[in-house]
Structure formats: C-alpha cells, structure tokens
Amino acid sequence: MARARPAHAVPSVAAYDAVVVGGGLYSGHWHKDARRFVRHHRKALAERPLWFFSSGPLDASAGERDIPPVPGVKKAMGRLDARGHATFGGCLEQGAKGWVARMILRNEQGGDFRDFDRIRAWAARIGRELTE
Ligand SMILES: Cc1cc2nc3c(=O)[nH]c(=O)nc-3n(C[C@H](O)[C@H](O)[C@H](O)COP(=O)(O)O)c2cc1C
C-alpha cells in the first residue's frame, strides 16, 4: 500500500518500507517543507529505497526531455543514495499566493502543466522495482 502525505505531516518514516519525496521548485530550490523533511529524516531515508521528484516547469519542457534535479536535490540524492529522480511539470493557477506568483499569472505564464499519465507511469515503475 502507498500513502501520499504532505511532508510537514509525517513525523516518522519508521513505518514505511520505501519513500518517495517530492518538492515544488521555488527559485531553484525545493519547497522548504521537502528540504526540512529530508534533513530531519536523513538517517531513516538512507536506510530505505528512496526516490525523489520535483514539480516545477510551467511549460511543456518536462514532458519533452529529462530535466535533472536542481543542485541541492542532486546533492541529497548522492548523500542518501536515492535510486532515481524525475521532474514533472508544475501548476500555478489563479489564487496562488505571493507577488512573484501574481506576476507570473499577470504575464499569462501560469497554468497546469502536470501530466498525470507520466506521473502514474513513473510511480508504477517504482512499484515494480519494489515488488520484483
Ligand atoms: C516564486 C516562485 C518561484 C518559482 N521558481 C521555479 C523554479 O525555479 N523552477 C521551476 O521549475 N519552477 C518554479 N516555479 C513554479 C513552481 O515550481 C510550480 O508552480 C510548482 O507546481 C509548485 O509546486 P507546489 O504547488 O506543489 O508547491 C516557481 C513558482 C513561484 C511562484
């Protein structure tokens, strides 16, 4: 069974056999909740099969090529021996908070670029790797 939980709501990963950590990208860094989660649980994460993903690009690029992890995420992958990483398109829609978000929306550069088929296919590969 797989559970999807917000990073800030997971006090321990002891009950999980494997972990997938994802973070939204903000100015070239993961959202602070994802960074904090990895820092806080680093020991337990290093002992488990681990994958990372990032959500960011507000265009079609994530579906056209493999976008590598940002430097901070790449470093954490090395330290914790993560098995893989994927970058998925992001989502920024009306109502998003912050002046940068409002500016992006005003310039009509927002939108929903999540590709759920690609996300599902990536998750299914992880499921297979864990059960094979
Ligand atoms: C202030 C701000 C900075 C952003 N910086 C980046 C960035 O550096 N790289 C990127 O790919 N996307 C960037 N984005 C787009 C977000 O990553 C995208 O909206 C993502 O879906 C956010 O994920 P979340 O809603 O799960 O937090 C930025 C968005 C905002 C509002």
Image (spheres, rainbow, N blue to C red):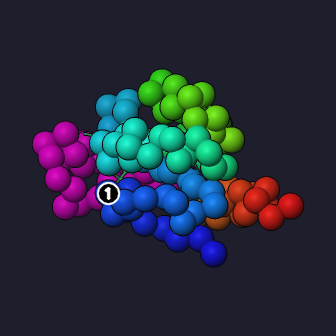
Residue that protrudes farthest toward the left in the picture: 99
Q: Position of residue 121 (x, y in %)?
A: 70, 61
Q: Residue at x 22, y 45 (%)?
A: 101
- Please state which of residues 78 and 47 is positioned toward the viewer in this rendering: 47
Q: Which residue is mark 1?
A: 8
Q: 19 above or below 5?
A: above
Q: 29 above or below 96?
A: above
- Please state which of residues 13 and 27 is positioned toward the viewer in this rendering: 13
Q: Residue at x 86, y 61 (%)?
A: 132
- Please state which of residues 33 and 14 is positioned toward the viewer in this rendering: 14
Q: Position of residue 104 (x, y in %)?
A: 25, 43
Amino acid type for the residue under numbered disc 1: His
Q: Indicate the quadrant of ligand 1 in the picture.
A: top left
Q: Position of residue 80 (x, y in %)?
A: 58, 35
User: Any atom of ligand 1 within 8 Å of the CB at mark 1?
Assistant: no
Q: Residue at x 17, y 53 (%)?
A: 97
Q: Name the side, left or right, on which 43 lies relative to 99.
A: right
Residue that protrudes farthest toward the bottom in the picture: 1
| Mark 1, secondary structure of its residue | helix
Q: Name the side, left or right, on which 108 lies relative to 84.
A: left
> Can residue 59 be seen here?
no
Quadrant where the image shows the N terminus: bottom right
Give the magenta range. Answer: 87-114
Q: Position of residue 77 (x, y in %)?
A: 57, 33
Report the number of numbered marks: 1
Quarter of the figure with residue 35: top left
Q: Residues within 10 Å of mark 1 (few under 14, many from 20)?
A: few
- Please state which of residues 29 and 114 is positioned toward the viewer in this rendering: 29
